Amino acid sequence: MTDSYQLDSYAADILCELGNIGAAHAATALSELLQAPIAMRVPQVELVPFDEISMTLGGPEVVVAGVFLQVTGDIEGTMFFIQSMKSAKQLVSNICGGEESKDGFSDIGLSALGEVGNILAANYLSALMDFTQLRMLPSVPLVAVDMAQSILSIALQTDQMGGRYALVIHTAVHHREEQEDAHFFLFPFPGAQDVLLHALGIGGSV
């Protein structure tokens, strides 16, 4: 198949709207977790070829914090919630109170990241399910701190993703006067990708 999927303005608007619906539900859940107001928005959703994904994070060797989940159901694949170290540390600090160490995260901090990733993934997938009527269920999250390419390589180990695309949901998390940027990457497995994109009304084939 040829790489011919494109997001026209209509498809991009639909995906952004779905992202914002998921973000609104996730913000409510995070507000309850933090006992403080949380706002989230999705300024951009795009399809990105797998071999270009790490550049959206600043390059393959940039150290990031990532939460990895497997997706099962009508659509199977992998999903990542990835933040820069600065944004992840700020988010964990807001959840746990106090500062994380300069070298990494405490066990409690890693657990907090996993919980945030789990909440966001469940709500984003729920918005996609409601729109597409396709079942997508997230697994228990795994958390890692490593170079961007090393974390994303989990998708390659799980299934051959060369030449494939990821649905990328760029997210801004607002807490008090601070903003933490985050990125969601959904990698449908070959076969499932075409089903998902056609259900979203995006023509062509990858």
Image: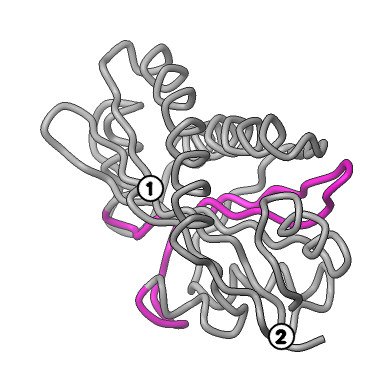
* Residue 57 occupies quadrant: bottom left
**Compared with residue 117, is residue 130 higher up or lower down, i.e. above or below?**
above
> Which residue: 64% across, 57% down?
186
1 or 2: tag closer to the N-terminus: 2
Badge 1 crowding class, 10 Å Cα cut-off, few under 14, some 14 to 19, many 20 or more, is: many
> Which residue: 78% across, 47% down?
71
Disc 2 is placed on an element classified as loop
Q: Position of residue 112 (x, y in %)?
A: 48, 33
Q: Position of residue 105 (x, y in %)?
A: 41, 48
Quarter of the image containing the C terminus?
bottom right
Circle 1 residue: 171
The one nearer the camera, 65 or 156, is: 156
Circle 2 residue: 163
Which amino acid does the dot numbered 2 rest on? Answer: Gly
Which amino acid does the dot numbered 1 rest on? Answer: Thr
- What label does residue 138 carry, if any? none
Position of residue 82 in the picture relative to residue 131 (left or right): left
Region in magenta: 58-86
